[in-house]
Amino acid sequence: MFTLTLEQSMAQAAQRTSEALASLLPAGDGPEARLTEAMRYAALGPGKRLRPFFALETARIFDLDEASVMRAACALECMHAYSLIHDDLPSMDDDDLRRGRPTVHIAYDEATAVLAGDALQAAAFEILADARTHPDATVRIELVARLARASGAAGMCGGQMIDLLGVRDDLGEVARMQRMKTGALIAYAFEIPLIVGRVGEGERAALMAFAHDLGLAYQIVDDLLDAQGDAADLGKAASKDAARGKANFVTLLGADAARARADLLKQQLKHHLKPFGARSQVLSDSVDFVLDRRR
Amino acid sequence: MFTLTLEQSMAQAAQRTSEALASLLPAGDGPEARLTEAMRYAALGPGKRLRPFFALETARIFDLDEASVMRAACALECMHAYSLIHDDLPSMDDDDLRRGRPTVHIAYDEATAVLAGDALQAAAFEILADARTHPDATVRIELVARLARASGAAGMCGGQMIDLLGVRDDLGEVARMQRMKTGALIAYAFEIPLIVGRVGEGERAALMAFAHDLGLAYQIVDDLLDAQGDAADLGKAASKDAARGKANFVTLLGADAARARADLLKQQLKHHLKPFGARSQVLSDSVDFVLDRRR
């Protein structure tokens, strides 16, 4: 056995996820092929595949079989892809570009974009429910229950609603919005191996704390990038929040205090991984990657 | 024990379903309450609750506990409600009225309508995955798997894509579109008790044939109503298909042949129920209701 570096682990996770997703989302035939094409355009496009990386790297800590975790991570990517399609719609954030490519409603049309998102959500649950994901139905149903919870009105959809309505000058509200809108699906990446590996309460609590702080740190860095970024570097229009008068961690705290808070979270994140020792080295390295990223 | 008439059974199923849904979709608080309100507006509005009626009436044939079937039927209603919200969107069928009330994007706004649909889909799977739906995880995961399949690219979403693209003058294609777009969720109403009751292959096949023909007959009658109806009677704008140049059973067959086909299906539907004898009387009566309905 040899140990992969962070870059190798991330590249490998991204490639394997894309391959697995491509086979889980076959190009259809018949007149509905336009729908499956749009689903593949969204789900198989370029992306960091951070959530699958987190799931697979956490699975490594517990020496789990990769096949189950990979399928569940693909389901998570389907949900993530659907949320991006719908968030980009004209009636939502009205974005024409995503990762440097036309968004789905630009590349296809609005109706196809709505449907592709809807069908990707269904595909996520279909993948999780399939016996090939795990032989034990109690594991599969917990994967379904947690994903449904994380993505519905109490999670991602609720968070997007709050974001659309616009949060006022309240840091607690911004933090709650982040936990719901993006934190819940990031946390789910860590829940996958915890559920598949039937991990005990102590280790589960440490990793969920890690997931929570990581989601928060990720959002603070996102807000810093939103304030500083330019369109060429981000692959999407920048400083959207400021232009829309939306409060976020940077508009409320200022860039310096936001950066200081992210640095504090970095220490805390590494602390959460202490119990896992060397097995969590790549995950620990990924904290630096997430917090120091430039896009 | 006494036997309920069709009208009593339908009214009772509708009322119980609405009550169960109201408790499964609580009004939220916090700034995201607008989302949960829109979800309730769509799911708790007036409706025939035909799918829950079919599920509950089929459960009666097999003397099943109503609680499991009711929860799964509520999940199905959440999916049905989400599909109506999204189908009504300006980028889809662009309908302002549904059952005589403003559609969700009119009563709220387009972004809220997209999100309410998304969150209702997640709620459906959350309800099914909950242990209160059935103590056995293998039953719950089959309910999830079948609903995901029925509603995704190979089912409802795929059918809606075909419908949006417009079917040419091919009866087979119109029939396939109907099976995917509306037939799959109607069939799921019958699958619920079959899964919950672990019904054997012979009875399962008879009821799935019934479900298939019922969905087809329902659509033919829908197309007849679309051709003949007026807006006041339907609670929505009528003759939409003709105005949009879309092929359906009536534009392809003509009204007389379409009606003859529906009548033939009526005989066939009653034939499918023969093995169940008197236990299926109310279901048999409902065939007349569905095929002779005027809205």
Image (cartoon, coloured by chain):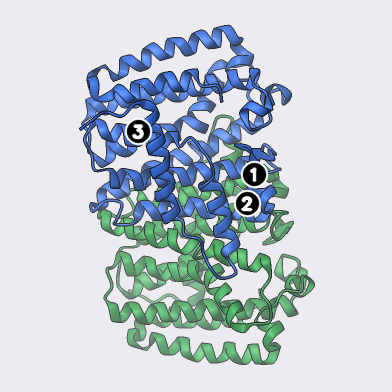
Chain colours: A blue, B green
Q: CA distance from mark 1 to mark 3?
A: 28 Å
Q: Is residue A8 left or right of residue B24?
A: left
Q: Position of residue A57 (x, y in %)?
A: 32, 32
Q: Is residue A58 above or below residue B22?
A: above
Q: Residue at x 38, y 65 (%)?
A: B192
Q: Tell me if mark 3 has few (under 14), some (14-19) or many (20+) residues whose alpha carbon lies within 10 angstroms of its own.
A: many
Q: Mark 3 or mark 1, which is nearer the start of the sequence?
A: 1
Q: Up-down: is B15 above or below B183?
A: above
Are the two marked residues, 2 and 1, in contact with CB atoms closer than 8 angstroms?
yes
Q: Which mark is residue A113?
A: 2
On the image, the x and y values in percent for residue B285 come to 48, 82
| Nearer the observer, B196 or B246 | B246
What is the number of the mark on residue B203? none
Query: Disc 2 is attached to a residue of which chain?
Result: A
The amino acid marked with disc number 2 is: Ala
The image shows residue B213 at horizontal and vertical percentages of 49, 81
Q: Which of the two labelled residues, at mark 2 and mark 1, occupies the earlier sequence position?
A: 1
The residue located at (62%, 52%) in the rendering is: A114
Q: Residue at x 38, y 11 (%)?
A: A267
- The circle drawn on residue A103 is 1
The residue carrying mark 3 is: A190
Residue at 32% across, 56% down: B140
Dot placed on the residue nearer the N-terminal end, 2 or 3 = 2
Q: Amino acid at mark 1?
A: Thr
Amino acid at circle 3: Phe
Query: Compared to B33, does B87 lie above or below?
Result: below
**Tag 3 subunit:** A
Tell if the residue under mark 2 belongs to the same chain as the one under mark 1.
yes
Do the residues at pointers 1 and 3 share their chain? yes
